[in-house]
Image (tube, grey):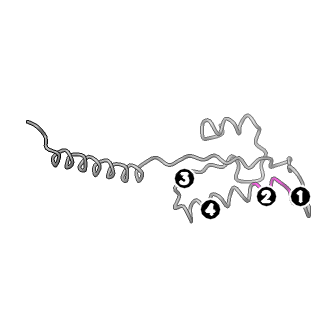
Amino acid sequence: MKATFKNRLQNVIFLLVILKTYLCFSQIIAPKKIIVIDPGHGGIDPGSLGVFNVREKDVVLNLAKEIVLLNKSVFDSRFEIHLTRHNDTLIALKDRSQFSKKGSIS
């Protein structure tokens, strides 16, 4: 049986609607992107000293915490964000790289 142009067009439109529906819903249930932020320095390592003796370790930690807050408030926790440190501690470089690979320091 030979398909008419109208039947083919209906099939194409149907497939496009199915594809569009799939794309819309797949974005909703897609896994979150994982972001690891490494606010370097910390502990006994202050990093660089800026104007008025502002320490780099404090600036980068505050920025990292602000990014986490923005993800929650503005982006409705669209991203899964992990920090390598949450307070003024020094984490060894090997532990930080391990964190980015495994998602935790152990």
Q: Which residue is mark 1?
A: 50
Closer to the N terminus: mark 4 or mark 2? 2
Label 1 Cα crowd, 10 Å radius (few <14 / some 14-19 / many 20+)? few
- Cβ atoms under marks 2 and 1 closer than 8 Å: yes
Q: Which residue is mark 3?
A: 79
Based on the displayed image, in which of its 4 quarters is residue 94 positioned? Answer: top right
Q: In the rendered view, does 3 fall on the left or right side of 26?
A: left
In the rendered structure, which amino acid carries the disc numbered 2? Val
In the structure shown, which secondary structural element does the residue marked by tag 3 occupy?
Answer: strand
Q: Distance from label 2 to label 3 (Cα)?
A: 22 Å
Closer to the N terminus: mark 3 or mark 4? 4
Q: Distance from label 2 to label 1 (Cα)?
A: 10 Å
Closer to the N terminus: mark 2 or mark 1? 1
In the rendered structure, which amino acid carries the disc numbered 3? Phe
Residue 45, horizontal then vertical, whole percent: 85, 47
Query: Looking at the image, which is closer to me, 37 or 16?
Result: 16
Task: Give the label on residue 59, or none.
Answer: 2
Q: How many marks?
A: 4
Query: Looking at the image, which is closer to me, 61 or 15?
Result: 15
Q: From the viewer's perspective, is residue 58 above or below residue 43? A: below
Q: Which residue is mark 4?
A: 69
User: What residue sits 17% from the left and 45% below the top?
Assistant: 5
In the rendered structure, which amino acid carries the disc numbered 4? Leu
User: What residue sits 28% from the left and 49% below the top?
Assistant: 18
The residue segment tinted magenta is: 55-60
